[in-house]
């Protein structure tokens, strides 16, 4: 889990209000540009353990007058403090842009820290890691699609005594949103309900005894694709090749 360090914090012997202060600061970041967007709401709800480790009412009613200082005083190590800066940056960029208010709030958190390493690290370095976390989140639809395809392969094999095959689609050079409507036709006999839209491109190779599903995605649009593979023996998608490609 990308945010496993927050879970470990909640299980560690720390001041009781540690998670509460962190949650409040993440929510405060989401509110910096005037409102909590849908993307920010979904991120806070689904990726951070706000509901299980903190009282939502307490999060919103906590005194937020000096949260950067409160975060700096927490009994967590420097790596955890830096990870929190990454998460704070993630909240700021999840809606596709970072406002001046959000940047100022992030800088206040960085400047409040007493650690020399944090003080000497440029804010763009922390935002770079935030973008990597965002890209990982944006890969998740690819993994979910591949898991659904793998499960459907077993149903297909049970009926036809062989595994299903499908050519790469959408094509890398085409408009994925438009071509996907055509792509869906090749799955007409496959026991999988193709979604209305899809993230990434997929190829399925099947025989009587084995299958390989390949999913590729280029979230940042630089022409380099992240590649995942599922097989009959290992249906859980596995990252292949350059692990830093987004």
Image (tube, rainbow, N blue to C red):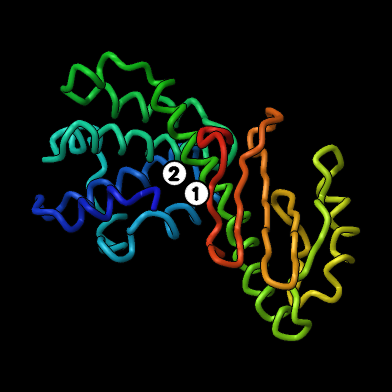
Q: Residues within 10 Å of mark 1 (few under 14, many from 20)?
A: many
Q: Are marks 1 and 2 in contact (CB under 8 Å)?
A: yes
Which residue in the rendered view is the most extreme toward the bottom? 159
In the figure, 23 relative to 226: above or below?
A: below
The total of numbered circles placed on residues is 2
Q: Is residue 33 left or right of residue 104?
A: right
What residue is rendered at 50% in x and 49% in y?
Answer: 40
Q: Which residue is mark 2?
A: 30
Q: Which residue is mark 1?
A: 40
Helix, strand or loop at mark 1? helix
Q: Position of residue 188 (x, y in %)?
A: 86, 73
Q: Position of residue 152 (x, y in %)?
A: 68, 74
Helix, strand or loop at mark 2? helix
What residue is rendered at 9% in x and 50% in y?
Answer: 15
Of 240 and 174, which appears nearest the observer? 240
Q: Position of residue 84 (x, y in %)?
A: 30, 38
Q: Is residue 182 left or right of residue 165?
A: right
Question: What is the C-alpha distance between the residues marked 1 and 2?
Answer: 6 Å
Which residue in the rendered view is the most extreme toward the front? 209
What residue is rendered at 27% in x and 13% in y?
Answer: 120
In the figure, 213 relative to 172: above or below?
A: below
What residue is rendered at 29% in x and 66% in y?
Answer: 52
Q: Position of residue 75 (x, y in %)?
A: 11, 40
Q: Is residue 143 left or right of residue 86?
A: right
Give the quarter of the image for residue 190.
bottom right
Marked residue nearer the N-terminal end (1 or 2): 2
In the figure, 199 relative to 55: above or below?
A: above
């Amino acid at each position: 889990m990308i945010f496993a360090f927050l879970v470990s914090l909640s299980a560690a012997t720390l001041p009781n209000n540690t998670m509460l202060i962190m949650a409040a600061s993440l929510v405060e970041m989401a509110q910096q540009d005037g409102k909590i967007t849908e993307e920010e709401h979904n991120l806070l709800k689904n990726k951070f353990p706000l509901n299980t480790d903190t009282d939502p009412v307490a999060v919103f009613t906590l005194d937020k007058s000096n949260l950067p200082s409160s975060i700096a005083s927490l009994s967590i190590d420097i790596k955890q403090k830096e990870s929190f800066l990454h998460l704070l940056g993630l909240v700021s960029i999840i809606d596709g842009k970072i406002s001046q208010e959000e940047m100022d709030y992030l800088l206040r958190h960085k400047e409040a820290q007493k650690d020399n390493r944090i003080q000497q690290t440029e804010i763009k370095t922390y935002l770079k890691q935030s973008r990597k976390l965002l890209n990982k989140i944006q890969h998740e639809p690819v993994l979910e699609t591949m898991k659904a395809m793998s499960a459907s392969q077993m149903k297909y094999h049970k009926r036809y005594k062989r595994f299903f095959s499908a050519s790469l689609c959408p094509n890398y050079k085409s408009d994925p949103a438009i071509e996907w409507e055509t792509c869906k036709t090749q799955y007409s006999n496959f026991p999988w309900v193709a979604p209305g839209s899809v993230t990434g491109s997929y190829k399925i190779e099947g025989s009587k005894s084995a299958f390989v599903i390949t999913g590729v995605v280029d979230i940042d649009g630089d022409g380099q694709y992240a590649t995942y593979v599922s097989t009959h023996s290992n249906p859980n998608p596995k990252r292949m090749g350059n692990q830093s490609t987004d």
